[in-house]
Image (spheres, rainbow, N blue to C red):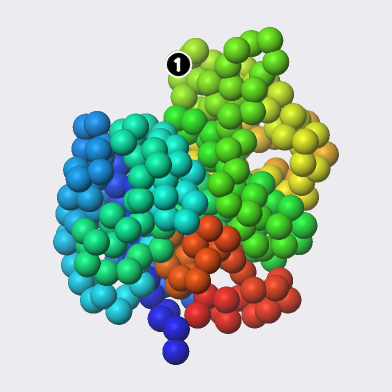
Amino acid sequence: MASKTAVGVDIGGTGIKAGLVDLEKGVLLSDRIKVSTPEGAEPPDVLAAVKEVLGKLDVTDADIPLGVAFPAIVKSGRTLSAANVSQKWIGFEAEKFFEDGLGRDIHFANDADVAGIAEVRYGAAKGQAGLTILTTLGTGIGSALLYNGVLVPNSELGHVQRAKHGKDAEAFAAYSAMERDELSWEQWAERLQWYYSYIEFLFSPDLFVVGGGVSKHADQFLHLLDLRTPIVPAVHRNNAGIIGAAALALVTDAPELAQAETPLEAEPDSAAG
């Protein structure tokens, strides 16, 4: 019988979080444990911090599946980019590095992708047919593409370019840009209007889900956007990475094409385990 619990670890540029997750309900069964990401975020230091959060979580049973989310393009266990972490992660055998360092198997995936998994299994995109695009608005803009409940991994829609401006979308429209440029909600929404209209034109999605910490303020800006596509806030916010990483921890056969769900008509609990 598949496990009904798993551990999720969410590695970010500023913090590393972990928790024990109920895979049937998509909720934390433990406190959320967090430590600061080590300065420079080089591989040995990040591994030590992951060991620290797992030690504080006090879940040592290797039979409990473990999923790890990381802020990079992840393909076949290798990190191909580095967002707010050391450049040493580029082209690095990260999944094997963590497995060797932790002495156990893990499932390793991109952080925005696992947030998408959390929302399609347990949140705003559950049961949604067609194409759902989740975006996380924070220091940058992360994205996850989910088609009929199946993850298409490693999209980087925060890096679409603004013609003639020399900067990508996240430099212009991420939540950090609002803070940096001291924008009002209305002014920031004008930038988001450009971004979501452009993504809508490129992909014709059926649903936008907006995640990241700012999603708790969705009532301040989502109603200001004029789109053909429904746009809703994410449900899991700051816990999405933990929950999604744990949910994917049971997928071991195809880490770069991890299925978010069995077909949509299946019972939700059968997908969770």
Residue 212 position (above or below residue 106): above
Look at 69% across and 51% down and name the residue there: 132
Q: Where residue 52 sits in the image (x, y, percent)?
A: 17, 54
Closer to the camera in the image, 252 or 50: 252
* Extreme residue toward the bottom, this view: 1
Does residue 180 appear left or right of residue 160 in this picture? left
Q: Secondary structure at mark 1?
A: helix
Among the 4 quarters of the image, the one containing residue 103 = bottom left
Does residue 218 appear left or right of residue 89 in this picture? right
- Whether residue 48 is visible, yes or no, is yes
Q: Where residue 149 sits in the image (x, y, percent)?
A: 67, 63
Does residue 255 appear left or right of residue 46 in this picture? right
Q: Which residue is mark 1?
A: 180
* Kind of residue sitting beneath label 1: Arg
Does residue 112 appear left or right of residue 88 in this picture? right
Look at 65% across and 62% down and name the residue there: 150
Closer to the camera in the image, 65 or 89: 89
Look at 19% across and 43% down and name the residue there: 45
Among the 4 quarters of the image, the one containing residue 38 = top left
Look at 47% across and 49% down and name the residue there: 74
Residue 252 position (above or below residue 219): below
Label 1 neighbour load within 10 Å: few <14, some 14-19, many 20+: few
Q: Where residue 264 sits in the image (x, y, percent)?
A: 71, 71
Among the 4 quarters of the image, the one containing residue 135 = top right
Q: Quadrant of the N terminus?
A: bottom left
